[in-house]
Image (spheres, coloured by chain):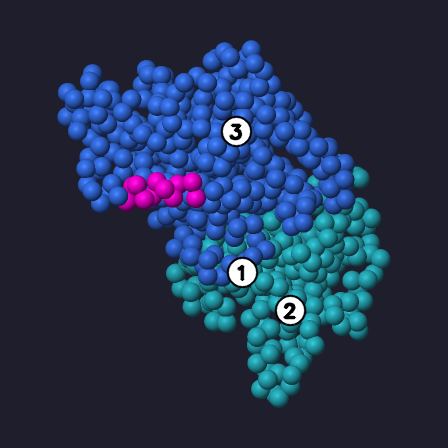
Chain colours: A cyan, B blue
């Protein structure tokens, strides 16, 4: 049976600690580039700080992790890639990027309204000795190609291999958990199969407190956000009064990772 | 100075007058320096990667894409002149036919060269032909531009082979003669290819559902920008050709084509520009009132960031659209050379502004509610690379003017021009 993997991220629980960013970078062999900035670094998972736009006692802030939304309908990046380096995996619903086929034209980055795609502006490098800590299950990407979140696809492979070794056709859901979900200290990120009506994530996604970013453009993103705060849920609207920047904690995490 | 006295006179068409060789080389020297700087900057980008540019993950397209779209639009004069002469039989435009081919060749080859630096993995260019995504506008652009550049090369070869020395080689003469017979067919093929890729370049942004500033509804699979790009390119291509011819006349101090040819180009440009302005205005109203609100974006949102306020929209439609359309078509202003050329300049500036708005403003504007308005300044490597392309264009055009029959009006060349 085809799955539709997705997430529900509880923004009321997110403290902006950046653990998810570090876990993602570590799991996916994201290079540690000393000169990378918030706009040139590779952050498939990026925690951004948003506020309600007020000052003083009325000011409210929240943290919102941004990753590939794995759009389901008219997936913008899939439509525009000239050489089929991006595809939606029909078996999982994951939007897959094939760096080895990528031309590096960056048209997909222009197409993505979530800014969730990253270009390798420089050769990948790690501090001396750190190469030995790389994840052997994930290929590093070369300079001049685009990359993004693939919901830790290597972990899905491992889960499938484990299931096959046990003679099963379906994976055990507990065996496939993306690194960011695993690392979140407040369990703000829930991951599951949206095609399974009994999956807690499917039930959560239908809660009145959940919303999706830019849902009106009609691309059916599979990353849901949840909050009891009305101003946070208003982020679903493009003309919300909210303002945002990279969170201080995220920047610190970036700097820590990039050395 | 008469060409027979020049060291390279045997390469110059018999009876043609050209400036002295040292003076010609003096003219080329600064352009050669700019070209060398451009090659060096491009080399840095290819060797060290695109970290040499100021583009980033949010501003993934920059100066190069804007200028690529701009020069491809301006280069539309090449296919459109061929279309007018060979398909619509407007023989009065023959005097600028060769020049239009060279201008088109320069624009397209220059754009392809810049694209070769702009992509992260240029050696994978063939992947698009091997694994084409038929849903992507960029696939269509890649196919059509590659094919059309080949057509332009085939159209340029007969002009090259009519050089005085090359004509002495019998095989070249036969080849040129045979190729010349194909030119009307090439013009028709070029027209078809150009219509598609000019449109697809507009479609590149028009299909971006995730960028509501650029996204447009359209007809069948083509967004409205597909048709607007074709219209704007064929409207301003002749104006650009007119400007190039007038500049060549100024630099050489010679009258290269009859004024009537420039007027005719201006009239065609003006009429098409008028149609374009009307279509663009209707499209803008539909987009602001229906397309954009349906995606949750109010029209005012796009124009609240300086310097991209409503004046830029007004300038694009009125100052660089309606005004030149009027000046180019109104008999009294078109009869005045200064007004005609000023109007052609405004029309060309207008198409560049349109490409700038669609490429740069689209990326600068926020999409997520908590995004900030972005700024980007190109690095010297980006500017120098493109400066190199302009220098390449000037050098190719200068060499072509000196040694080839570019303007059929001048003495001793185009034997195929009726009435000359």
Query: Please, which residue is most extreme toward the front here?
Result: B419
As measured in the structure, the alpha-carbon distance from the residue carrying label 1 to the one carrying label 3 is 34 Å
Identify the residue position indicated by label 2 in the image. A90
Query: Where does the N terminus of chain B fall, quadrant-wise?
Result: top left
Q: Residue at x 29, y 41 (%)?
A: B176
Query: Where does the C terminus of chain B fall, quadrant-wise?
Result: top left
In the shown orientation, is residue B308 left or right of residue A241?
Answer: left
Q: Pick whichever, B416 or A238, lies toward us.
A: B416
Other-residue count near label 3 (Cα within 10 Å), few / some / many at <14 / 14–19 / ≥20: many
- Highlighted range, magenta: B175-185
Residue B417 vertical position relative to residue B166 in the rendered view, above or below: above
Q: Main secondary structure of the magenta part?
A: helix
Q: Residue at x 60, y 73 (%)?
A: A156
Mark number for residue A84? 1
Q: Residue at x 42, y 40 (%)?
A: B184
Q: Chain of mark 1?
A: A
Residue B111 vertical position relative to residue B268 in the rendered view, above or below: below
Q: Pick whichever, B416 or A41, lies toward us.
A: B416
Choose top left, top right, bottom left or bottom right for residue B156.
top left
Secondary structure category for the residue under label 1: loop
Q: Position of residue B271 (x, y in %)?
A: 59, 25
Q: Chain of mark 2?
A: A
Secondary structure category for the residue under label 2: loop
Q: Pick whichever, B359 or A33, lies toward us.
A: B359
Identify the residue position indicated by label 3 in the image. B236
Q: Is residue A188 visible?
A: no
In the shown orientation, is residue B404 left or right of residue A253?
Answer: left
In the shown orientation, is residue A75 left or right of residue B15?
Answer: right
Q: Position of residue A188 (x, y in %)?
A: 72, 61
State whether discs 2 and 1 lie on one chain. yes
């Amino acid at each position: 049976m085809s799955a539709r993997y997705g997430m529900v991220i509880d923004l009321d629980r997110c403290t902006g600690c950046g653990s998810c960013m570090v876990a993602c970078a570590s799991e996916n062999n994201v290079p540690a580039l000393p000169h990378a900035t918030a706009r040139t670094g590779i952050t498939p998972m990026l925690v951004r700080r948003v506020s309600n736009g007020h000052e003083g006692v009325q000011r409210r802030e929240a943290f919102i992790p941004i990753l590939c939304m794995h759009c389901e309908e008219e997936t913008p990046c899939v439509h525009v890639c000239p050489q089929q380096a991006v595809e939606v995996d029909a078996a999982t619903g994951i939007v897959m990027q094939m760096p080895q086929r990528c031309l590096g034209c960056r048209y997909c980055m222009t197409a993505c309204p979530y800014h969730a795609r990253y270009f390798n502006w420089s050769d990948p490098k790690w501090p001396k000795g750190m190469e030995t800590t790389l994840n052997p299950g994930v290929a590093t990407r070369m300079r001049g190609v685009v990359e993004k979140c693939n919901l830790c696809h290597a972990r899905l492979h491992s889960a499938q291999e484990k299931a096959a070794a046990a003679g099963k056709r379906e994976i055990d859901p507990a065996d496939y958990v993306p690194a960011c979900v695993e690392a979140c200290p407040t369990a703000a990120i829930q991951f599951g199969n949206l095609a399974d009506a009994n999956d807690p994530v499917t039930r959560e996604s239908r809660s009145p407190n959940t919303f999706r970013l830019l849902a009106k453009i009609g691309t059916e993103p599979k990353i849901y956000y949840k909050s009891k705060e009305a101003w946070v849920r208003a982020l679903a609207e493009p003309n919300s009064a909210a303002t945002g920047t990279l969170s201080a904690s995220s920047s610190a995490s970036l700097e820590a990772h990039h050395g | 100075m008469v060409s027979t006295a020049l060291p390279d006179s045997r390469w110059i068409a018999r009876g043609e007058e050209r400036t002295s060789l040292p003076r010609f080389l003096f003219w080329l020297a600064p352009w050669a320096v700019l070209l060398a700087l451009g090659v060096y900057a491009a080399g840095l980008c290819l060797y060290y990667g695109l970290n040499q540019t100021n583009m980033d993950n949010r501003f993934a397209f920059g100066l190069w894409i804007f200028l690529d779209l701009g020069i491809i639009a301006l280069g539309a004069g090449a296919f459109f002149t061929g279309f007018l002469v060979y398909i619509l039989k407007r023989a009065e435009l023959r005097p600028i036919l060769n020049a239009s081919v060279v201008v088109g060749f320069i624009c397209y080859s220059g754009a392809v060269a810049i694209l070769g630096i702009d992509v992260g993995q240029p050696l994978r260019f063939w992947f698009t032909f091997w694994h084409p995504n038929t849903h992507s506008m960029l696939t269509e652009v890649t196919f059509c531009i590659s094919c059309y550049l080949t057509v332009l090369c085939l159209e340029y070869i007969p002009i090259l082979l009519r050089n005085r020395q090359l004509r002495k080689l019998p095989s070249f003469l036969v080849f040129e003669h045979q190729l010349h017979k194909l030119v009307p067919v090439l013009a028709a093929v070029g027209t078809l290819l150009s219509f598609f890729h000019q449109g697809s370049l507009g479609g590149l942004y028009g299909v971006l559902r995730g960028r509501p500033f650029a996204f447009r509804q359209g007809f069948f699979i083509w967004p409205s920008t597909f048709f607007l790009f074709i219209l704007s390119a064929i409207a301003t291509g002749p104006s650009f050709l007119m400007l190039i011819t007038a500049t060549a006349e100024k630099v050489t101090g010679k009258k290269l084509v009859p004024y009537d040819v420039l007027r005719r180009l201006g009239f065609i440009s003006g009429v098409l520009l008028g149609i374009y302005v009307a279509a663009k205005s209707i499209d803008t109203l539909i987009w602001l009132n229906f397309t954009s609100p349906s995606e949750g974006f109010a029209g005012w949102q796009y124009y609240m960031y300086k310097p991209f306020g409503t004046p830029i929209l007004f300038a694009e439609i009125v100052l660089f659209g309606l005004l030149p359309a009027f000046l180019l078509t109104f008999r009294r202003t078109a009869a005045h050379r200064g007004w005609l050329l000023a109007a052609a300049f405004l029309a060309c500036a207008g198409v560049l502004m349109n490409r700038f708005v669609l490429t740069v403003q689209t990326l600068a504007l926020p999409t997520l509610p908590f995004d900030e308005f972005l700024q980007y300044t190109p690095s010297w490597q980006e500017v120098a690379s493109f400066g190199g392309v302009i220098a390449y264009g000037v050098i190719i055009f200068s060499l072509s003017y000196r040694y080839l029959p570019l303007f059929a009006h001048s003495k001793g060349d185009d034997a195929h021009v009726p009435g000359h």
